[in-house]
């Protein structure tokens, strides 16, 4: 079984305007909403790839109920902890020429509620996959991911970590199967400017020395690169199509990579499917769909 964890899920409310003017009432031209959070995004795309997953995390209030219902409607199993107080966050994304985002903090998570989530990790078995994606809410300890991985250290679980800076680096001692920094995050981790392909490979291998098995680097418009556990370097480009939405592209890449490796046990194929899923999301208003993924696979 594949498990995804989203500690701070959201409803992403997207509004389109011709122009945003301060100090007056602005009228939208169109609106849409999506149930979000990086782990939930991964679960959604895994479902499009015909892979089951169980979504774990926290929900709260009426927005939390909506998120749970949205996950259920997609046919995805979930086992969320329902928080006593607050509501799951609503993030507002304003598209008016440029894009402006307003991300909420999310509800307070009490220590006993965190322990309830931790106890659910005990059901994860040898051979399962756990995907930790996104940031840690400011009401939780900074070492929450580390404590989760410590709880699983004696099991043969395939760990995937898609997080930034300290969260990512602190997970490396648990030898995650896959991490997915981008080039900017490589620069921030090592306090250098990573520009060239040679530098990208060099610092990916430094992350391997710290414990990562496979390092998948998203390169934006240049595609993606994988330095696998055997030291081999694989590259994937991008397809040329109008980019509509980049939100969730990285999560889609993680889902595609995990699905590709699960199906073929091949790193080149995992990178290919991951790249296709990331592209598919970029070319759609929401996340990648089975139809778009299959269309792009024929072109990639």
Image (cartoon, rainbow, N blue to C red):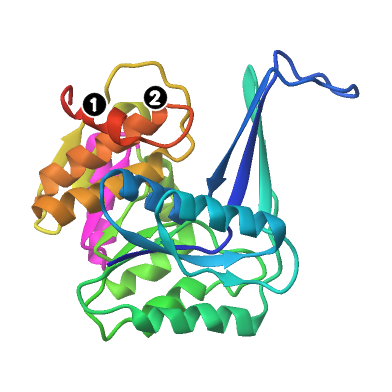
Rate crowding at label 1 as few (under 14), some (14 to 19) or many (20 or more) other CA atoms within 10 Å: some
Q: Residue furthest top?
A: 18
The relative height of residue 13 versus residue 108 in the rendered view (above or below) is: above
Picture coordinates of residue 242 (x, y %)? 40, 16
Residue range corresponding to the magenta coloring: 195-219
Question: x and y percent of residue 71 in the render?
Answer: 48, 53
* Residue positioned 42% across, 37% down in the render: 287
Residue 60 visible at all = yes
Q: Earlier in the sequence, mark 1 or mark 2?
A: 2
Mark sitting on residue 250: none
Q: Which mark is residue 296?
A: 1
Q: Which residue is painted at 26% across and 54% down in the image?
A: 51
Image side of residue 230 versus residue 79, left or right: left
The structure residue drawn at horizontal position 90% and vertical position 21%, both measured from the top left corner, is: 24
Q: Left or right: 113 with respect to 108?
A: left
Asked whether 218 falls inside the magenta stretch, the response is yes
Task: Give the label on residue 283, or none.
Answer: 2
Task: Indicate left or right for 106 with 270 as reference.
Answer: right
Identify which residue, 290 or 125, lies in the foreground. Answer: 290
The quadrant of the image that shows the C terminus is top left
- Could you tell me how many numbered marks the image carries? 2
- Assess whether mark 2 and mark 1 are in contact (beta carbons under 8 angstroms): yes
Furthest-right residue in this view: 23
Mark 2 Cα-neighbour bin, 10 Å: few <14, some 14–19, many ≥20: many
- Report the front residue among 148 and 172: 148
Q: Is residue 108 above or below residue 133?
A: below
Mark 1 and mark 2: Cα distance apart in space? 10 Å
Q: Position of residue 219 (x, y in %)?
A: 33, 35
Helix, strand or loop status at disc 1? helix
């Amino acid at each position: 079984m594949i498990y995804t964890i989203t500690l701070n899920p959201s409803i992403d409310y997207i509004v389109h305007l011709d122009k945003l003017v301060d100090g007056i009432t602005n009228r939208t031209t169109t609106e849409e909403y999506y149930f979000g959070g990086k782990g939930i995004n991964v679960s959604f795309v895994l479902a499009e790839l015909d892979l089951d997953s169980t979504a774990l995390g926290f929900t709260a209030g009426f927005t939390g109920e909506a998120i749970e219902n949205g996950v259920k409607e997609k046919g995805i199993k979930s086992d969320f902890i329902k928080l006593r107080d607050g509501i799951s966050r609503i993030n507002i994304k304003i598209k008016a020429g440029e894009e402006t985002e307003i991300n909420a903090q999310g509800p307070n998570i009490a220590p006993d509620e965190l322990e309830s989530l931790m106890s659910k990790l005990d059901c994860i078995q040898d051979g399962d996959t756990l995907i930790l994606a996104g940031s840690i809410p400011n009401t939780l300890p900074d070492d929450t991911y580390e404590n989760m991985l410590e709880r699983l250290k004696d099991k043969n679980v395939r760990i995937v970590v898609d997080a930034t800076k300290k969260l990512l680096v602190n997970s490396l001692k648990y030898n995650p199967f896959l991490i997915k920094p981008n080039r900017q995050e490589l620069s921030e981790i090592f306090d250098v400017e990573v520009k060239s392909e040679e530098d990208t490979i060099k610092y990916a291998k430094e992350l391997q020395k710290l414990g990562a098995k496979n390092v998948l680097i998203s390169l934006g418009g240049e595609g993606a690169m994988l330095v696998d556990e055997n030291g081999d370097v694989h590259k994937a480009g991008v397809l040329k199509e109008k980019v509509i939405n980049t939100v969730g592209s990285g999560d889609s890449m993680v889902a595609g990579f995990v699905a590709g490796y699960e199906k073929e046990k091949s790193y080149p194929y995992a990178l290919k499917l991951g790249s296709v899923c990331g592209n598919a999301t970029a070319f759609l208003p929401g996340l990648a769909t089975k139809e778009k993924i299959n269309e792009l696979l024929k072109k990639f």
